[in-house]
Amino acid sequence: MSDLSEDDAAEAFEAARDERMPMLLLDRVVRRYRQGADALEVLSGASMALHAGEVVALVAPSGTGKSTLLHVAGLLERPDGGEVYLDGEPTSSLSDDARTALRRNEVGFVYQFHHLLPEFSALENVALPQLIRGLPAPQARERASELLSYLGLGHRLSHRPAELSGGEQQRVAIARAVANAPRLLFADEPTGNLDPVTSAHVFNTLTRLARASGLAAVVATHNLDLAGTLDRRITLRDGQIVDL
Ligand SMILES: Nc1ncnc2c1ncn2[C@@H]1O[C@H](COP(=O)(O)OP(=O)(O)OP(=O)(O)O)[C@@H](O)[C@H]1O
């Protein structure tokens, strides 16, 4: 007879189940945009699984739906069909408020343009999402300082966005995206505005941070060399996700 009690066995079963369960699962997701009488179907049954710790490149031609996919996966947009599961839980039936709370706590976004607040310093920009979440100011500032130092910006804490280079601005935006310790990170052409050398530096910084944090990330990029450094590459073909 086993020494395992029923409770232990149930716990072990749950742990094993969680280990296999993707953090994010897209199941036959459909997304259409309506334009007058016409409907443009951008995602037509897109499916993918993303596990904790995976950093995936999304490489696809312009206009094929990369941003749309990241917005649906990141709970910014609702799909018109299919389901987005987070930790095995369906998200489509959640209220807008519940989705916003989930997104604020679990998801970080980085865009091609940094979208930093111009009147705030680098430190304040990174502290802000934590303050909004209710963290006391000294702790928020301390984490912001640690993150920025980790990203090589310890000497730029009090600079405003206009006083930073393009690569520095993007690194601040990356720090801000992970300030609340999200479990999912979506980056939409995060190096699209940068020169090749800065681009590689920012991209590598982003992936190093993602790996160190153990979060799962999808990075949309047109740069095949940079995409080649990630764990996996996916693309969009006829509205579906396929491995590259
Ligand atoms: N809000 C919208 N209303 C109508 N059509 C839209 C909307 N958003 C996107 N589209 C269309 O959906 C298609 C996919 O757009 P999306 O921005 O997802 O592509 P993308 O692959 O990210 O492109 P890029 O690489 O140029 O940024 C495009 O044809 C676009 O014109």
Image: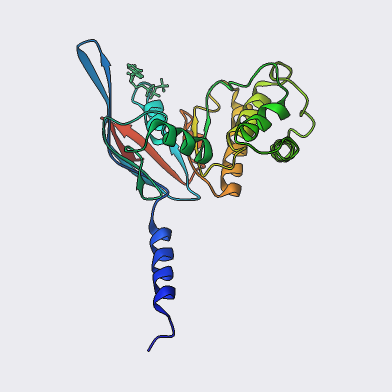
Q: Give the answer, above or below, for where 167 lies relative to 230.
A: above
- Residue 33 sits in quarter: top left
Residue 145 rendering spot, x and y as whole percentages: 74, 37
Q: Give the answer, above or below, for where 145 lies relative to 67.
A: below
Left or right of 96 in this view: 79: left
Left or right of 234 in this view: 188: right
- Residue 20 sits in quarter: bottom left
Residue 125 rendering spot, x and y as whole percentages: 67, 27
Residue nearest the viewer, comparing 34 with 168: 34
Residue 199 rendering spot, x and y as whole percentages: 59, 28
Residue nearest the viewer, comparing 26 with 167: 26
Q: Is residue 201 visible?
A: no
Q: Quadrant of ligand 1?
A: top left
**Which residue ends up furthest to the top in the rendered image?**
36
Left or right of 138 in this view: 83: left
- Residue 36 sits in quarter: top left
Q: Give the answer, above or below, for where 217 lies relative to 176.
A: below
Q: Is residue 154 visible?
A: yes
Q: How is the image coloured?
A: rainbow
- Which residue appears at 55% of the width and 50% of the height? 214
Classify the position of the C terminus by image quarter: top left
Left or right of 93 in this view: 202: right
Looking at the image, how many numbered discs can be counted on the residues? 0
Residue 10 rendering spot, x and y as whole percentages: 39, 70
- Which residue appears at 55% of the width and 27% of the height? 191
**Which residue ends up furthest to the left in the rendered image?**
37
Residue nearest the viewer, comparing 109 with 231: 109
Residue nearest the viewer, comparing 97 with 16: 97
Classify the position of the N terminus by image quarter: bottom left
- Which residue appears at 32% of the width and 37% of the height? 92
